[in-house]
Image: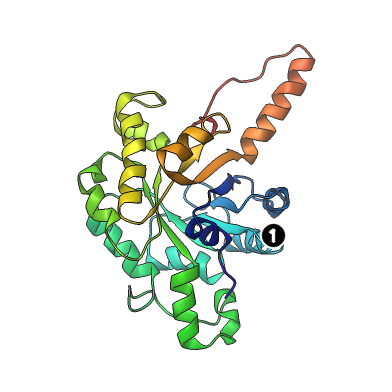
Amino acid sequence: MRTSKVLNKLRSGEIASCFKVNLKDAQVSEIAAIAGFDCVWVDLEHIGQDWSVIASHVWATKAHDADLMVRVPRGSYSDYVKPLEMDATGILVPHIMGVEDAKKVIHMTRFHPVGRRPIDGGNADGAYTALDFSDYLMSANRERFVVLQIEDPEPLNELEEIAQLDGFDMLFFGPGDFSQGIGAPGQWDHPLLLETRRRVAEVANRHGKYAATVGSAANLQDLTEMGYHFVSVGADVVGLKDYCRNIVGAFGQKGTQGKSYLEQ
C-alpha cells in the first residue's frame, strides 16, 4: 500500500498543505498536485458527484504523489469506507457531535484490532487482492488517515475525551458551521470562535493528535504557531471567482460580492 504523504510529513513534525477542490473535473486536482500541495480535499457532503468522479480525483492525485482527502456524507458505514477502498488517502467526517459519535466512526473505519471496518481487499487500496491480507489490514490502519471535524458547540464538553480515543489522526476545526452553531454566522472574529479554534489545537496536540483547520495565506503563520499542522488554504472556486472578478472589473463592471469561510 502506498504511504501517505500527509502522515509522513506530520509524523516528521512538518506542516502539511491542503487545497480544496469543489469542481468535479479531476484536472483541477491534478493542477493542485502538480503545483506541490501535499493533499487535495474533495467533497461528498455538499457536492453532488458520483463515485466515478471520486475515482478520477484519486488517480489524478496519485499520479503526482499527492494525498486525497474525501469529506464523506454522514450516512452508513459504506459511505465512509468506499473512498478508502478506492484508495483515497484519508476521509474527513463532518459534524462529530460527541465522544460516542466519534467512537462509532472509528469502529466503522478502522480494521482490527482498533475497529470493525468491513473487509473486502479486492479494490484499489488492497491492490485488487495482491496485498497480503494481514499486511493490508495493518497498512490501512497505519497509512490511511481519519479526520474528525469539530464544527459545532455540542461536542466541546467532551473534546478531551474525543481527543483521547485511539483510531483517528486529526481533529479538524471548521469555523463556518461553528459560527452558525453559536448564533454568529460569518462573525469570524467572534470571541468564542477564536477561543475554540485555539482550544481544538491545544487539545489535539496534548493528546497526540494532529490539529487541522482551514486558513489563508494571511493567517497561515498564526495557525501554525497556534499548533495547527494540517491547514487547507484556498479553493478552486475562490481562485476562479477572483480571476473572473478581476477581468470583469477591467470592463468597469462589478460582480456579486461575498466572502466565504474558505477565504478567512
Residue 51 position in % (x across, y down): 58, 63
What residue appears at the point 54 percent right and 25 percent down from the top-left corner? 259
Image position, residue 177 (x, y; %): 38, 37
Query: Closest to the observer: 216 or 246?
Result: 216
Can residue 211 be seen at all in this image of the molecule? Answer: yes
Mark 1: secondary structure: helix
| x and y percentages locating residue 79 in the rendered image | 44, 63
Q: Is residue 97 left or right of residue 3?
A: left
Whether residue 120 appears in this view of the structure is no
Name the residue: 50% across, 30% down. 264
Q: Residue furthest top?
A: 252
Number of numbered discs? 1
Q: Quadrant of residue 256?
A: top right
Relative to 207, 128 lies left or right: right
In this orientation, which residue lies closer to the viewer: 205 or 29? Answer: 205
* Amino acid at circle 1: Ala
Q: Is residue 114 above or below residue 48?
A: below
Q: Please report the residue visible at 69 percent of the width from the left and 34 percent of the height from the top.
A: 240
Would you call the spot at circle 1 few (<14 residues within 10 Å), some (14-19), or many (20 or more)?
A: many
Q: Is residue 132 above or below residue 42?
A: below
Q: Of 85 and 230, which appears nearest the observer?
A: 230
- Is residue 261 shown left or right of residue 185? right
Task: Say above or below: 239 vs 232.
Answer: above
Where the N terminus falls, by quadrant? bottom right
Query: Which residue extends farthest left?
Result: 157
Colour scheme shown:
rainbow
**Residue 234, image quadrant:** top right
